[in-house]
Amino acid sequence: MSGLAGKFAELTRSRNYRFDTLMTSGWVIFGKSFGFFVQLFIAFFFGANRQTDLFFLAFTILLYVTVAIGEAPRRALVLFIAEKTSCRDDPNGFLNHVLTSGWLLLAVLLGLIAAGLPPLMRMTALYDENATATLMRHFLLGAPMVFFICGTCWVSGLLDYHKKFWISAAAPALRSAAALAVLFAFRRHWGIYAAMAGYVVGEAALFLVTVSAARRITGFRPQWRVGDPRRLGPFVSTAGFLVAASAAALASSVVDRLVASWVGAGNLSLLQYSSTIVFTLHGVFIAGFETVLIAYWSEAFHSGRNRAGLRANFALRAVETLAISVPVCLICWFFRQEIARLLFLRGSFPPQAAPELAEIFGLQVFALIPWPILIALSHYFIVIRKTGVLFAAALIRVVLAVACDLALAPRLGVRGIALSTTIQTSLLALFLYSYFVRGGREARTRPTSETSPGATFE
């Protein structure tokens, strides 16, 4: 490893990096475990049927908006807050401008979706009027959740910059506890609608806690601030590609759910329950590393702008995550039947569906191997502001989702959709890695100040 790359590696091998990664991972485990319980109790109380399918489809559409508009800009926010802090600009005012503009955008977007969803669902999912009405009730009930989640994501970007990772990692436990409380209290009166109401209450509580923590730590005060839109120009140009990329990438999840709804009643719910296990495993073993990594990379890149060191550090982090994800995947695949029975074979969950759930999970879990590589590469391109690459990758993923789902689902049923997820993730990681390698070759043939021997990190 070169001397410059070694300096970058020392930065992220420091006690602070290791400590932050370890602590964040621990808090993520704490926060994710509560979220997993919500899904378990939904399966326990309501099973896997057409009603749960409609709930999960509405939830997926709402989540689609929140991740695209909330989580994607959060990653760019860390980068811009680091830049503004280094320039002695006001990051809190910038964040309030983002909050105000973002919520106005969400109001318009949700209105358009609410208007277009009924005809779209009737056309694509072959739902009748009653099913479409149920879907819309879930959507409208859960719509406030989108504002709370996106607000939480944006404020968490400020906390991430200040290395307060544990707050955003542990706070979801509060959200899940509130959701479980509403679910237990009102399930007999509201049925499956209690689950959506619980998520709304939980996200509202999480938003208030996150804002309170940001105010205590950074002095941030939320304000309605509509300033000169040109001040957000650089952020919008960077985050815009991330939003478009996330929207395109998440469209594959919507495609998966729609195709699952065609396969038969209850299959969409089985796919959701399997995905919940996989997402929980990802949160337990990998999410802490991802949260810490982009904050350290952003800070180091802006202090020295040494791309060669950043590339070398990516290789180290990739080896670390593979050393975790490969054994976890193999163990989970070997015990897939036992895991499915242990977690879901109780209450209203149909016993005959447990073997099918296990096989779906066994195919999906292998996505955990390329997934952390895909995320780390995404962070790399965000930090160096080549988000157009991520947009291209997302478009490829949508094409892969449609092609793989339509090719595999008629032959393998919902198992084909699970296999499609693993194929998509693997091919996308390979695509980004090939672009990453090509960029390294170009850097060696065209030396710049960013990779020159004089560049250092302060």
Image (spheres, grey):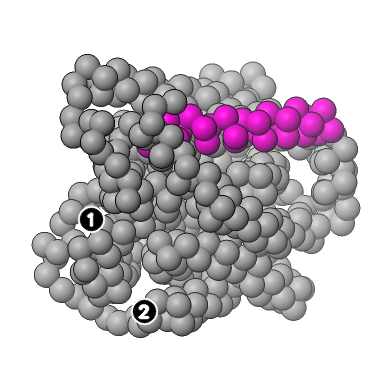
> What is the x, y in percent for residue 406?
52, 24
Q: Magenta stretch containing residue 315, yes or no?
A: yes
Helix, strand, or loop for circle 2? loop
The structure residue drawn at horizontal position 64% and vertical position 19%, both measured from the top left corner, is 411
Is residue 241 depicted above or below 321 in this figure?
Answer: below
Q: Is residue 292 visible?
A: yes
Is residue 42 depicted above or below 185 in this figure?
Answer: above
Q: Are marks 2 and 1 in contact (CB under 8 Å)?
A: no
Q: Does residue 335 appear left or right of residue 432 in this picture?
A: right
Q: Of the residues under marks 2 and 1, which one precedes in the sequence?
A: 2
Q: Magenta stretch containing residue 200, yes or no?
A: no
The structure residue drawn at horizontal position 19% and vertical position 21%, both measured from the top left corner, is 446
> What is the x, y in percent for residue 312?
42, 30
Q: Name the residue that disc number 1 marks.
A: 235
Q: Which residues lie in the magenta part?
A: 310-336
Q: Nearer the viewer, mark 2 or mark 1?
A: 2
Numbered tag placed on residue 220 in the rendering: 2
> What is the x, y in percent for residue 155?
41, 69
> What is the x, y in percent for residue 328?
73, 34
Task: Name the main secondary structure of what is drawn in magenta.
Answer: helix
Q: Does residue 274 appear left or right of residue 137 in this picture?
A: right
Is residue 88 depicted above or below 293 in this figure?
Answer: below
At label 2, which amino acid type do we have?
A: Phe
Q: How many marks?
A: 2
The structure residue drawn at horizontal position 25% and vertical position 23%, both measured from the top left corner, is 443
